[in-house]
Amino acid sequence: MSQTIAPRVRTLLLLLLAVTGALLAGSAPVSAHAALTASDPQQGSVVKEAPAQVSLTFSEGVAMSDGSVRVLDPKGKRVDTGKSSEQGTNTYSVKLHSGLPDGTFTVTYQVVSADSHPVSGAFTFSIGAPSTTSVSVSDQEASGGVVGGLYGFARYLSYAGFILLVGGAAFVLACWQRGTGERSVQRLVVSGWLALTGATLAMLLLRGSYTGSGKVGDIFDLSLLSDVLQTKTGAALVSRLLLLAAGALFIAVLFGAYEKREDDEEKGDLTFGLAIGGFVVAAGLAATWAMAEHASTGIQTGISMPVDVLHLLAVAVWLGGLSTLLVALYRAPSIEPAAVRRFSRIAFGSVAVLAATGIYQSWRQLGSWSAFTGTSYGQLLLVKIGLVVVLVGIAWISRRWTARLSQASAAKTVKAAKTSAATPVKATTKASAKTPAKASAKTSAAASAKASATAATSEKSEDKDRETEDEKEPAATPAGGGDGKRATQLARQRAAVATAREKRVRDADPLRSGLRRSVLAEAGVAVVLLAVTTVLTSTEPGRTVEEAEAATAASSQEATGALAVDIPFDTGGKDGKGLARVEIDPARVGGNDMHVYVQRPNGKAFDIPEVKVSFTLKAKDIGPLPVVPDRIATGHWTASGVQIPMAGNWAIAVTVRTSDIDQVTVDKNAQIG
């Protein structure tokens, strides 16, 4: 049987690693959950006099420390004091030294958003007039690299451990109490506890480097660990560890004292106590995610946090119970159809809760229908919804197999009852047709013959078994105690033979085999679903993206009358995705100043070899009017005197070349004039 299981387990493991790696690689660096919506001086602006400070406004509150914001002159020298302060709602500033020269200055920032994710980026402004700059923004960021990958894997492992721990325990208590004695089930739940505990400890160690330098050497920096413990995320991780200590006690009772209870009344009382205690621990563990991530920020946090707890518990009960059922079907000698039916009903309720809470959270994080297709969060959410639909479809097939298995079991029970009821009647009827003396004599003779035959058969069977066992058994040692060792070996062999016989009978059942296959398929989809969910929690919500874009456009228009257009692009090559922002000032008929900022998906400046822009007014058949801007800094291109001959809805086309062969042209319409 182990030979049959091993390839399937390896397949699931390889699927897990492949999907996790692909998604983490595709999502790195992790998108931030707080976006820069405004700055003073503005991005790309030219001011006449040197400002006394630089201010940054984000879409939500962020955590800052000294050095979080740096301002560099054209030669790359720092010109800020390093002391940041909060100036208003989500607005932070850093003071500058006096006597700054003319030229282009670069502002870099690295902070932590309210939902615990690192936020970093850079922009430029100029004093007097734009100039060339030697500053090159590094592609390395806190949430990327080796540390970012390790932290992402630890997050995945923590979710998986939570699901196995909570779902496995719930399955045993609510559906299959006999499962407390199954070693395979015990190992599954304990593995979930170990995975969650190990991942939590790893995240505590990685957190300082993850939100800071991103260096592997800083993982074991105790000063960074001390700083992490003072943050909201650090408090959540420590709380999780304390709850896991209570979870260890719960596991010890569940698979220890509870499994040994024989009195039904005592066992019922202990079941109730374990259910209450287990729910408190599980809800507390789920709350450690809700209090530190998406649910803790944005709108309606008072509702979203308990809803998030329910969502996580529903996922754990469904997918964790599914994993336990899979283990029971493959590793346990048998599982009652009634237990499968109970889990089927509980899983249905979990899916209903999951759907209701998921709809609310989706509305809260997206905010509009356009965010489904226009943001990375919405696109990932569509993938998740599709996987859930597939999973529910496979679960429906599993329910059909469960119904057939239950019907077959009920039919066997009825048949056995009829057989046991009919046998005595038949014997009595035959006996009554004969004379008492003859009946007694024949009955006695028949009984003796039957007993002799049974004894002979039993002796032959036992002799054959002994011969087989003696052939397999190693020679007994002549020293004392050899007979005891031989008896122990025989007992183990007989137990193994009995277990193998039970497994052969179980595996020969086509209904159980069909249920195993469908549950295995569910588990495979669940692995992919969990990976997508992990990446989704690290992706900037659609509502935040759209609000940040609207705020940036409104701020730019209000301050300068300039037009800002963001155009995503993908050249198709390696590292070919990014965003081109075209700013036109004053966006009126006649001469205009144009700035083009090319950024990576994480907001970092994108160093590319060439950018071209053209303007087309299709309604009047004007254009395309080509513009070739000059590069003045990493990811920053500019052109002066761009002529717009007529007001209208212009198509702005940007050609981006990221390598010698990778190039793409993207466009977007905007009202100019």
Image: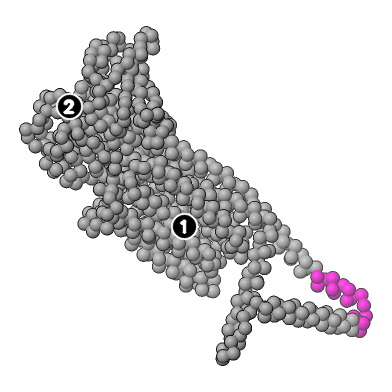
Find residue 131 and name its label. Answer: 2
Residue 299 vs residue 528: left or right? left
What residue span does the magenta drawing correspond to? 423-440
Q: Which comes sooner in the sequence, label 2 or label 1?
A: 2
Separation of disc 2 and disc 1 at Cα? 58 Å
Q: Is residue 204 or residue 421 the one in the foreground?
A: 204
- Under tag 1, what secondary structure? helix
Q: Is residue 543 or residue 553 the one in the foreground?
A: 553
Give percent across and percent down for residue 414: 73, 62
Residue 429 vs residue 405: left or right? right
Magenta span contains residue 649? no
Residue 586 vs residue 651: left or right? left
Q: In the rendered image, is residue 229 in sight?
A: no
Q: Is residue 383 or residue 274 the one in the foreground?
A: 383
Give percent across and percent down for residue 63: 23, 45
Give percent across and percent down for residue 561: 23, 20
Give above or below for 663 relative to 459: above
- Amino acid type shown at disc 1: Leu
Outermost residue to the front = 660
Outermost residue to the bottom = 480
Magenta span contains residue 433? yes
| Disc nearest the viewer among 2 and 1 | 2
Find residue 164 and name its label. Answer: 1
